[in-house]
Amino acid sequence: MARGSHLGPIGGTDMRNVFLLAAVVLAGCHGGGTEPTPPVPTIATVVIEPGSVSLDAFGATTRLVATARDKTGAELPGKTFAWSSDASTIASVDASGLVTAAANGQATIHATVDGINGTAVVLVSQSVASIEVTPASKTLDALEAQTQLTAVALDANEHPIAGKPITWSSANEMVARVTSAGLVTAKGNGTVSINAAAGSVTGAASIVVRQVPVGLAFTVQPTGRKVSLPLAPAVEVTERDANGFKVADATDHVTLSLGANPSAAALGGTRTVAAVGGVARFADLTIDRTGAYTLIASADALGGATSDAFPIGSCPCAYVPSNNSNSVTVIEQATGMVIGTIPVGASPSGIAATPNGNRVYVTNALSNSISVIETALDEVVATIPMDFVGGRGGPVGIGITPDGARAYVANRFAFSYGPISVISTATNTVLGDIAVSGVEPVGVAVAPNGAFVYVTSQTSGTVEVIETATNSQIAMFSVGGNAYEIAFAPDGAHAYVTSTPVNNIVNVVKTADHTVERTLPVPAFGLAVSPDGAYLYASGEDRVWKISTSDYSIVATITVPRSPTSRSAIVITTDGKFAYRTAGIIPGTSSVNVIDLSSNTVVATIPVGQVPTGIVLTP
């Protein structure tokens, strides 16, 4: 029999059981009918955005945003964060994440929730937004006046930026200059911008330079002059600012009056003048009495000024040409005061006066001319040119005839035969030229009777004798090398000629036959004979020898200031009491020594122009 199961037909009761069982099974599968609770999400990270930020001004702000995220990176909203800064003095943060810059540096900002922390870096570094210059404007009222400017670099919120280098510059250095430290110096009138820069950012101050006159100064001092002659050069008074600079646009009226006035003199001429270009010029001032004076300058609201003392004198006078100063100094014999300085040509060398003293003739070696000075005016009234076809140069020695009608001039050519020119003093023109045999003629002297002229020739060491009646050379004799200076005895019987420095002698010449009678071992250059003819004075470098003309013995040796031999000219006053000797070649030492011939001592030294080359006295 086959094996198997036997299932009978299912009845109604069985079917109910099946449904119940299925229901039980299904009920077991759904937990008894209650939904399960899902798990709570946890914070894995806190992210702050932006993660880094830079602020370039104190007080600048930025807002940070913090976000909580789970481990999947999903945002967990609704979280409240605690904000903090690890350097709140650099950057602080409030409860909402607003960060405020307070100082340069770096701060870390924290946002914390449920123990989870996020960070962001804040860098505070000020940048220059503007430059503040103090003071913003300034007026300077004198040239070289100064003011100190300061400059501060500011950020965008106008907070100072410490330690920021500032570069200073001036828009116009003709008006004002500025140092690297901001010190401004006025240089000229006007307005200028003084700039302060830090990188490409600049600030500026406006500087106005406007000179204000506060005082007066004599810029051309009054100098010695003869009574009632206009002071020359014209006196000038300048309006000055507080630092002593001329105020070029000043136009105040300036008035002059006498200060020191020992002789109760009157000041003549125009005494009140309006300044032009800041200078008041007085061209016609005169003083009517001799003495030593000062002038006082005054103007409304300005400080006054007093001039240097100056003399007003009268003749007899001494006239001294100065080779390097191109001028002639006028000295009052009675007082030794310098009472005038007269401009002449270039390199004045020789000098001679007409017998009446009305005119003085000065040879100008480098300008090839002769200046004619009218002594009543102490001005050059004529200039005689010494040029001719073939060339002429270097007029040096000059002598005038006793009648004052003619002047004889030696024209010195280097190592050549220069002619002697004859000049009419009436017309101040060259009448003609006389050829001479000597080489480099330099010295000229006219005999007291006017019959002949001696001319020394330096290189050939000779003396040429010119007859004035015919204006021709009639004789020549040798005196040794470097013949130069000549002096005649008052009676004309003898002449004296120096030969220095070659032979260092003085030649005694008998004029009757133009022969050397004897020589004196005296290294002199300048020569002069006393009015009575008793003494010959020979001037050397540092002494003057007083020589008796009776036996040619040296009766006195007078010590004098040192001077190069060729610069020691000497003359004797008409009363025979004093000698005037030129001295000096070094600047500041040029002078005239006044020698008292009774005591044989130097009693005065009078400063003159640089390198005096001769001297002549006028009555």
Image (tube, rainbow, N blue to C red):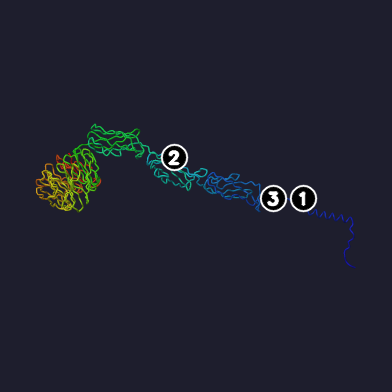
- Is 376 above or below relative to 35? above
Task: Answer with mark 1 or mark 3, whichever residue precedes in sequence.
Answer: 1
Residue 513 in picture, x, y percent from top left: 9, 49
The C terminus - image quarter: top left
As shown in the figure, which amino acid type bears the numbered disc 2?
Ser
**Quadrant of the frame with the N terminus:** bottom right
Residue under label 1: 34
Task: Classify 1 as above or below 105.
Answer: below
Whether residue 98 is visible: yes
Of 460 and 99, the residue lying toward us: 460
Residue 354 at x, y percent in the picture: 17, 41
Pointer 2 local density, CA inside 10 Å: few below 14, some 14–19, many at least 20: some
Disc 3 or disc 2, which is closer to the eye?
2
- Amino acid bearing label 1: Thr
Q: Are marks 1 and 3 in contact (CB under 8 Å)?
A: no
Count residues near mark 1 (Cα–Cα under 10 Å), then give few for <14, some for 14-19, many for 20+: few
Badge 2 is on which residue?
A: 137
Determine the CA span between mark 3 and mark 2: 72 Å
| Cα distance between the residues tagged 2 and 1 | 89 Å
Residue with the mark numbered 3 = 40
Q: Secondary structure at mark 1?
A: loop
